[in-house]
Image (cartoon, rainbow, N blue to C red):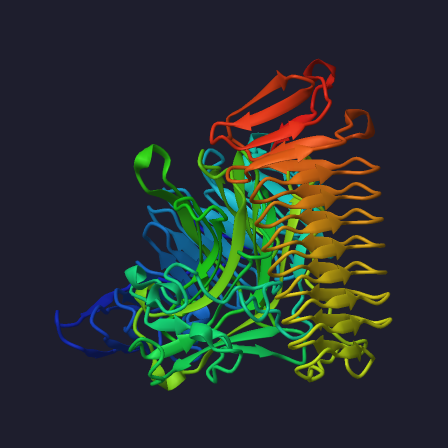
Amino acid sequence: MALYKFNGEAAAETAAPVQNFYGVSGAVDSETGGAQAESFWGGDGDLMVGAGGDDTYYIKSATDRVVEQAGGGTDLIHAWRNINLADYANVENLAVDSDGVYGAGDGHDNVIYAGSGTEQLYGGGGQDVLVAGSGKDTFIVKAGEGSDAIYGFKTATDVVRLSAGFTSFADVQAHMTQVGADTKIDFGGGEGLILRGVQASALTGANFQLELAPARLGAMTFHDEFSGPLSLYDKESNPGGTWRPDYDLQGTQGAGSYTLSSNGERQIYTSPYFRDHNGDFAESPFVSNGDGTLSIIARPSSNPEIFGYGYTSGMISSKESFAQTYGYFEMRAELPHAAGGWPAFWLLPADRSWPPELDVMETLTNDPHADWTTAHSGVGGTHTSSGIASYIPDTADGFHTYGVLWTSSDLVWYVDNVEVFHAATPADMNKPMYMIANLALGGWGGSIDNAAMPAEMKIDYIRAYSLGSTATASPPPVVSPPPPTGSGQATSPLQPTSGSDVLQASAGQAEIHGGAGADTLTGWSGNSFLTGDDGDDLINGGSGFDRTNGNAGNDTVHGNGGDDWVTGGRDNDLLFGDDGRDILNGNLGNDTMDGGAGDDVVRGGQGDDLLKGGDGADWLTGDRGSDTLTGGAGADTFQLFSGSGADRVTDFNAAEGDHVALDVGVHYQASQVGADTMVTLDTGDSLTLAGVSLSSLPPGWIFQA
């Protein structure tokens, strides 16, 4: 059957061979053809050299080599593995035949055939012809790369992964016309896609993977643009840090906190705080770049502190700063190509259970075009997983976005804003999860190429959003801090004395540490980073963004103007958000906290705390201990979760819009206890609404999400 391109011209097909060259099994052969149409059979790292005529190369091994002459006929590679024609000069056509593999064209007019498996076909630039096989096939089509024609499309099973500005099947239908026996989809500018022999009326939304609709996203709940110094968590030095650089599975001195040995990994994740270093461990993998990106660098190491492993690398985890149930989670990154690398972006439960696990992206650098997306579950006591490897086309700058939309019923993964895989949400994936980005070496990543070291993973941003169409139990947006100076450049912290210091931040000195003694620290009109350290300190933020931390001692901390982070640290602290949308975290000790004006997040931490939201729509959670919560004016949300203890709300007012938030799937009972309404979990944790009659509460006053 003749094949015709989108514009009606006949496609250049490869003639059937009239002579075959077979190598010797188990040997590395060199096969050279002549002027006829010939076939070459590889398999053990063979060298196959074509000349004139249409040549067909059967590639069975990743080490098979092809040398084709320019102008030497219309040639074809037939393979049972992933193939990118850009790696094979002067070869025009391609056939792939195996479950889960891809076949990718180059910038020329290619003909690409699928076989009997579940293949992914991508033409790339040019007027390409993509031919379906007998299995379930996916055709990757991007506007701006020429116009493609698809033959043999099966409406019952096949899918077009379409990047053309369409976010719904209705968008596709609006650009769809029937042209004789074919369906044509118009991209504009003279480009489009034609499905040969397909009736438009037979197509459904299930036949298309489209771009993410912005309406599916709610508010941004977390973001780090990495435009300033990396905010690293350390229990002693920086408990308010955004990113934890280890797993925290075996304490500070156990190797299991710094690698996953069960995966066969060969790196140790380090940081300036590695193994209780006070910010001075020399082999840190993190580099904050001037272009607003973060580099995680893996390299060989003989450092005696890395437990006998041969490599150091890095991971960042939002375990200490952010977790969320449901939403959209995305990273934009440029991945390394050094063999043996295993970069990943994934989510784990905040309650330390496993499974579930949600892998947004895993890539093995021996094939950087394959992106693995997987959901792990433990329903029924058995570990199961659902996932796929998707082809990733090249981008001009090397960066791609990797995201997952997680709802109570569905998981949808996206690469460069286009859907690549869809699965049902496992029944046990219904709890807050935090984000991890890391660069592993070895294990599933394969053999490490030391000659290509160091390997670099460059991250542009990591973001999270709530869902756009349903209510969630996520607190108000949690944002990473901007750079600590007005210019966006870091400065060295002001050095304290051992006494009681009075220190003022400024444009040239935005980071202040109080050190020992009862210190007074004051911010300025820009962004400040104020840490009291030891002693009973008084900290007053300025009118800009302030990241404050009392640390040790009984401290008094004010955020003052702006949207601030106010952390108590150890001991019994007084915390005030004051104006703006603030995040207050009591951390250790019995703390007293007041969000003040604005929509605030107030978290008690450990100990028996007193929390006040103040004016605005506040989110209050006592966390651990027996806490007393007062929302104040506005529609406030009070959170109850497993392990939160016995908390009491003094002013719950459903008429003002107050709510109680529970994690999805928890079992609870609401009952009248005297004059109060009590919500009790099966775990024994409770939240008492003082003076509230259960019968007076309207529908929706308590929700799970």
Q: Residue at x 56, y 66 (%)?
A: 233
Q: Quadrant of the C terminus?
A: top right
Q: Residue at x 68, y 84 (%)?
A: 497
Question: Could you say where residue 269 lies in the image, as x and y percent from the top left?
Answer: 42, 71
Total marks placed: 0
Question: Could you say where residue 14 lies in the image, as x and y percent from the top left?
Answer: 38, 62
Q: Is residue 8 visible?
A: no
Q: Nearer the viewer, residue 506 or 379?
A: 506
Rendered view: 161 above or below 107: above
Q: Nearer the viewer, residue 611 or 481?
A: 611
| Corner quadrant of residue 332 | bottom right
Q: Residue at x 37, y 69 (%)?
A: 253
Residue 313 falls left or right of residue 622: left
Question: Could you say where residue 326 lies in the image, as x and y percent from the top left?
Answer: 58, 42
Residue 495 falls left or right of residue 73: right
Q: Is residue 420 visible?
A: yes
Question: Could you say where residue 610 lies in the image, as x and y percent from the top left?
Answer: 69, 44
| Corner quadrant of residue 103 | bottom left
Q: Nearer the viewer, residue 646 or 155?
A: 646
Toward the top, the furthest residue is 695
Rendered view: 488 above or below 537: below
